[in-house]
Image: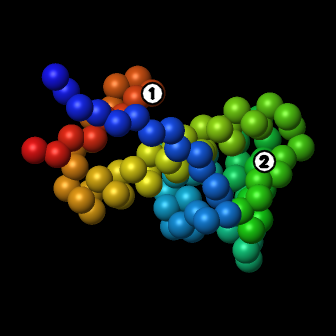
């Protein structure tokens, strides 16, 4: 009988690793410009501005893209930890399983 633990992750962009955040933006299919401490993220429907970990946008439909960015950042974080502790990542649909042999 398999043993498992299920954890849900909430992403706080205030504590974000800046380089990993930029990788996550690219992985989510968006582009960005860095202006000082501000990251301007270009989405197909508008712009998301991240300043000091706080995301702002004018178009309310950008929330969908912010959620995609958070998911992408979560995945990048999990990949980094899995690599550090030598876990294998199995991703199916929107679920990730970590295995260590």
Residue at coordinates 17% horizontally, 45% vertically from top-left? 100
Can residue 69 be seen from the camera position used here?
yes
Q: Nearer the viewer, residue 37 or 87?
A: 87
Please tell me the numbered disc located at residue 94: 1
Q: Nearer the viewer, residue 18 or 16?
A: 16
Front of the two marks 2 and 1: 1
SS state under label 1: loop
Q: Earlier in the sequence, mark 2 or mark 1?
A: 2
Residue at coordinates 45% horizontally, 27% vertically from top-left? 94
Q: Is residue 53 above or below residue 2?
A: below
Viewed as shown, does residue 89 lie left or right of 42?
A: left
SS state under label 2: strand
- x then y, percent, for residue 54: 77, 58
- Where is mark 2, residue-wise? 47
The residues bearing labels 2 and 1 have C-alpha atoms spaced at a distance of: 25 Å
**Residues packed near mark 1 inside 10 Å, few (<14), some (14 to 19) or many (20 plus):** few
Looking at the rendered image, the quarter that the N terminus falls into is top left
**Residues packed near mark 2 inside 10 Å, few (<14), some (14 to 19) or many (20 plus):** many
Can residue 44 be seen from the camera position used here?
no
Residue contact between numbered discs 2 and 1, judged by CB atoms under 8 Å: no
- x then y, percent, for residue 60: 85, 34
Viewed as shown, does residue 55 lie left or right of 86?
A: right
Residue at coordinates 86% horizontally, 37% vertically from top-left? 59
Colour style of the rendered protein structure? rainbow
Of all residues, the one furthest to the left in this rendering is: 101
């Amino acid at each position: 009988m398999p043993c498992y633990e299920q954890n849900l992750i909430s992403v706080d962009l205030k504590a974000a690793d800046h380089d990993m955040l930029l990788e996550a933006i690219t992985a989510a299919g968006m582009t960005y410009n860095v202006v000082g401490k501000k990251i301007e993220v270009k989405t197909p429907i508008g712009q998301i501005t991240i300043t000091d970990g706080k995301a702002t946008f004018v178009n309310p439909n950008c929330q969908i893209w912010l959620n995609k960015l958070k998911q992408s950042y979560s995945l990048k974080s999990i990949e980094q930890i899995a690599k550090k502790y030598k876990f294998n990542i199995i991703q199916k649909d929107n679920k990730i399983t970590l295995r260590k042999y």
